Image (cartoon, rainbow, N blue to C red):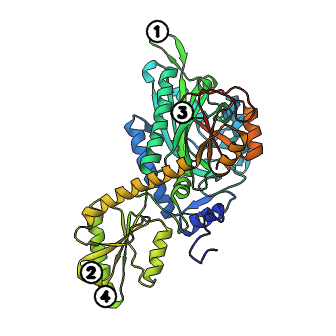
Amino acid sequence: MGRDERGVTPQNEDFSAWYNELVAKAQLVDRGPAKGTMVIRPYGYRLWELIQEELDRRIKDTGHENAYFPLLIPESYLRREADHVEGFSPELAIVTHAGGKELEEPLVVRPTSETIIGEMMAKWVSSHRDLPLLLNQWANVVRWELRPRMFLRTTEFLWQEGHTAHADEADAMRETMLALDLYTEVARDIAAIPVVPGEKTPGERFAGAVRTFTIEGMMRDGKALQAGTSHYMGTNFAKAFDIQYTSEAGRLELCHTTSWGMSTRMIGGVIMTHGDDKGLVLPPRLAPYQVVIVPIGRGDQGAQTSAAALELAGRLKAAGIRTHVDDRAQLSPGFRFNDWELRGAPIRLELGPRDLEAGTVVMAKRLGDEGKQSISLSSAPELIPGVLEEFQAFLLQRATEYRDSHTMRVDTWDAFTKAVASGWALVLHCGRPACEDDIKAKVAATPRCIPLDGTPETGWCVHCGEASAYGKRVIFGRAY
């Protein structure tokens, strides 16, 4: 069974094709002219704005301030922290010529901003009174991508990156976990993605970090998506950039720094966590339009239903509901219904001449077993907010049940290979990067995280049989 002109390839036939077709047909994104770049269309950018609003408010509420740092970074800055430059070297875009001549020092197009911000922190911090320094930046970054996929892996993408400096490890670790909590909250409460917060294994740490923490979500093909990361840098960047402060005792001490980021990759996570064969399914708290009203009718009747739809939209907007009236009268009602199913609107309201005469409107939810139902026009602004909240909760519950039913606790290699073929495996592991690499080569699965809420357990590595390293089980899975 293939797709029709408007539809998309079914997920169970080819999940990758489903995704690639959907992001284009739902008017979220288009390909940019340079390899691996994307043009985010207004509907897709509105999704990003809504994620941004939710996250930015939480960042500011916890005492951080937004700033902006240069896109172009002297190449020598990256070379100051050895692990950092080694980790990013394959992905760097470097400017060697400008103004018609070769530059004395090449400039790196920022892949991340630890180095340039570290340079500034060293200027701005001198005393313990200057700490903690809590900065955040909303920006674009460039990482040369060989196998691009819209939103998930592109050469240029948008994100926020928090960068903070602290007096000691304890305060920096509190910050690292605070950022992880913010990401978990936005993913679960806003995007309805039931992420698992955990720590990355040493082999999966961010280049230059002492500890890396992540939130991992399961997509509807059983693969994992890293949806946000938070890093404790120790004093690695403080040493490299001379970020020091005078303590209360009068001693010169190195700062402990953190960095953390969430990107437009979250949009891909929303698409793949909730979408189905009809198209997008958007959580109400993230939907550009929570309600779409489709007036039906021709001639005078069409004019009447359109006017009533606009009046209803005004009342819904006044109740705080993002509402759109689709009055494309040249298109059939059926086409418009299917279009908004494809684009994931949580609630569609159909308003025809008979509905108007009866003082009702037909409500159709994007998902659910109850089908269409008539509600009164007068009560819609009071009724719909509750329906949207129920839909939001339903999506989180549905995604949680899917994740849990596709996560297996296994102790043998055969069971492990079966588990990672369709979902996640919870296993004991030795912690050796060489063993991780061997597993990846054999079954394309990597350690996603050591869950923070994992129960204490010891035993033997599922792959090599050596003693387990973490005192709890690790999530392995194939990933984006």
Q: Position of residue 116 (x, y in %)?
A: 59, 35
Q: Please name the amino acid that badge 1 sits on.
A: Ala
**Point 47% across, 54% down: residue:** 398
To which residue does mark 3 refer? 454
| In the image, farthest residue toward the bottom | 299
Q: Regarding mark 4 in the picture, which secondary structure is present there?
A: helix
- Residue 258 can be seen in this image: yes
Whether tag 1 and tag 3 are in contact, CB under 8 A, the answer is no
Q: Please identify, in this view, whether the residue under mark 3 or under mark 4 is nearer the observer.
A: 3
Disc 3 on helix, strand or loop? loop
Mark closest to the chain's N terminus, 4 or 2 = 4
Which of marks 2 and 3 precedes in the sequence? 2
Vertical comparison of 53 with 311: above or below = above
**Nearer the viewer's eye, disc 1 or disc 4?**
4
Looking at the picture, how far across and down is residue 390, in whole percent? 36, 57
Q: Earlier in the sequence, mark 1 or mark 4?
A: 1
The answer to whether 383 appears left or right of 390 in the picture is left
The crowd level at tag 3 (other Cα within 10 Å; few <14, some 14-19, many 20+) is some
Is the Cβ of the residue at disc 3 closer than 8 Å to that at disc 4? no
> Marks 1/4: CA distance?
81 Å
State the residue position of label 4. 301
User: Going from the N terminus, do you reach mark 1 or mark 3 first?
Assistant: 1
Closest to the observer, 335 or 131: 335
Q: Quadrant of residue 114?
A: top right
> Looking at the rendered structure, which numbered label has been put on residue 356?
2
Give amino acid for label 3. Gly
Q: Residue at x 47, y 30 (%)?
A: 175
Q: In the image shown, does 61 or 170 lie closer to the viewer?
A: 170
Q: Please tell me in which quadrant of the rendered image residue 383 appears.
A: bottom left
Q: Which residue is mark 1?
A: 249
How far across and down, in percent of the image, does residue 141 sit?
60, 47
